[in-house]
Image: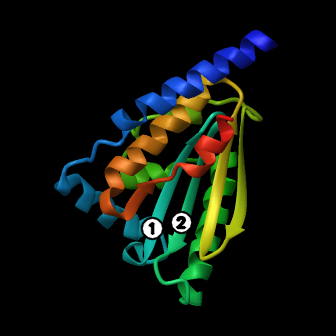
Amino acid sequence: MERSLKLLSVLGIAACLAGNAFASSASPERQADVAQRGAQVMPFALSQTTHIFERTADGGIQKVVLKDGADSAQLALIRQHLKEIGDQFANRDFSGPETIHGRDMPGLEALRNAEPGEMSVRYTDIQGGAQLQFAAARPELVHAIHSWIGAQLSDHGKDAVEGHSAHHHSMH
């Protein structure tokens, strides 16, 4: 057990160090295509939100928050969408990201092939938005979540930022 924990710690540190490799941006043309396809999947206004992605030792966190926290209609759309996406992901249905980013999006194949119970997805309301927390015990799935987060950051460009707070707390 201790050896497994050490291995997970080493993998988490390696993922943290590799994080900059994931953060490269897609071409402006790809980002525009992703934004256009995203408007077909996401019911809220992408331009009025920020997507925050954090890699954690056991997976990651996706947050969607309003740039102007006073828009209750957009807030309701964010929360409804993330609840639906969380339920779909828990059932290994990744059709939303596939529509936006393509079926070959990094990490999705491994996540699609995960056995029931190997990955958990937890939805939470947060101030000004909502979040999904992804967790897996198997290192390959943690890596797949990290790859998926990297692809999100690359494809969404200025509409997505990499968060650090949860990742740093998980390393202590």
Tell me if residue 59 comes above or below residue 37 in the rendering: above
Residue 92 in view: no
Q: Is residue 142 left or right of residue 49?
A: right
Residue beneath label 2, please? 64
Q: Residue at 46% across / 35% down in the picture?
A: 147
Q: Position of residue 112 (x, y in %)?
A: 57, 36
Q: Residue at 24% across / 62% down in the picture?
A: 32
Quadrant occupied by the C terminus: top right
Residue 157 in view: yes
Nearest the viewer among 79 and 2 is 2
Q: Is residue 10 left or right of residue 29?
A: right
Is mark 2 in CB contact (under 8 Å) with mark 1?
yes
Specify how the rendered protein is coloured: rainbow
Q: Residue at 39% across / 50% down in the picture?
A: 153
Give SS at disc 2.
strand
Give SS at disc 1.
strand
Please identify the residue farthest to the front as the structure is shown: 172
Residue beneath label 1, please? 50
Q: Position of residue 54 (x, y in %)?
A: 54, 48
| CA gap, disc 2 and disc 1 | 6 Å
Tell me if residue 9 comes above or below residue 160 in the rendering: above
Q: Position of residue 154 (x, y in %)?
A: 33, 48
Q: Is residue 70 left or right of residue 35?
A: right
Quadrant occupied by the N terminus: top right
Crowd rating for badge 1 (residues with CA inside 10 Å; few <14, some 14–19, many 20+): some
